[in-house]
Amino acid sequence: MKHLWIRTALVAVISILFFGCTQPAPEATATHAQPEPEPLSRTEFAGRVENYFEYEPLHAGKASQFLIHVTDMSDGSPVEKAEVTLAVRGKGSADAAAQTVARVGKVTGIYVAELNIPRAGNYDIEFHIKNDKLDERMQLSDFKVE
């Protein structure tokens, strides 16, 4: 009788350990941050200006940040103290869907703009870069807003 009691207790302990250790891990909760989307980038040239810019994927009604690096191709120097304006137009439209002026970044030649496009679709963006030394416009196409 004594051995039966020990065997029963041993089977119970092993069963508890086995079933307790084989439970699946709980699903990840909503508190984990979603990975940020990879920024998109382009390099464009017009006249004396090289415009390399990175931007967050464009979503209708949501602000996307543009980090704009502007270089004067005549001497390779960063473009200083410029007013950089972005004007967004729907494909084939003359009317601006959105417009913003970039603020000067902490590093010479870098400008930061927030662009909020109200509707999904395909757009063109005009970059207007102006300072004491230059006045350049770049008409760029193929921006998709989801």
Image (cartoon, rainbow, N blue to C red):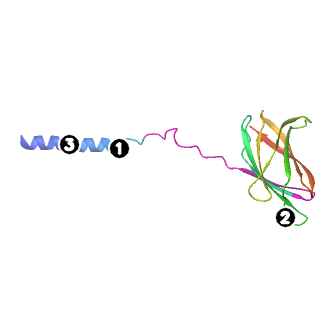
- Residue visible at 51% across and 40% down? 31
Instruction: Confirm whether the magenta stretch covers residue 22.
Output: no
The amino acid type, in three-letter code, at marker 2 is Ser
Residue 22 is labelled as: 1
Answer with the quarter of the image where residue 45 lies. Answer: bottom right
Left or right relative to 70: residue 20? left
**Placement of the C terminus among the 4 image quadrants:** top right
Residue 108: where, in percent of width, then height?
78, 59
Q: Main secondary structure of the magenta part?
A: loop
Judge whether residue 46 is colored magenta: yes
Decide if residue 63 is on the left or right side of residue 95. left
Task: Give the labeled residue for mark 2.
Answer: 77
Residue behind mark 3: 11
- Name the residue located 91 percent from the left edge and 64 percent from the top edge: 74
Q: Secondary structure at mark 3?
A: helix
Q: Position of residue 54 (x, y in %)?
A: 75, 52
Residue 40 rendering spot, x and y as whole percentages:
73, 50
- Residue 42 to residue 11: above or below: below
In three-dimensional space, the C-alpha distance between marks 2 and 1, rounded to whole angstroms, equals: 63 Å
Q: Is residue 48 left or right of residue 106?
A: right
- Report the residue at 14% width, 43% height from top: 7
Q: Nearer the viewer, residue 136 or 146?
A: 136
Which residue corresponds to the image point at 37% horizontal and 41% vertical from the top-left? 23
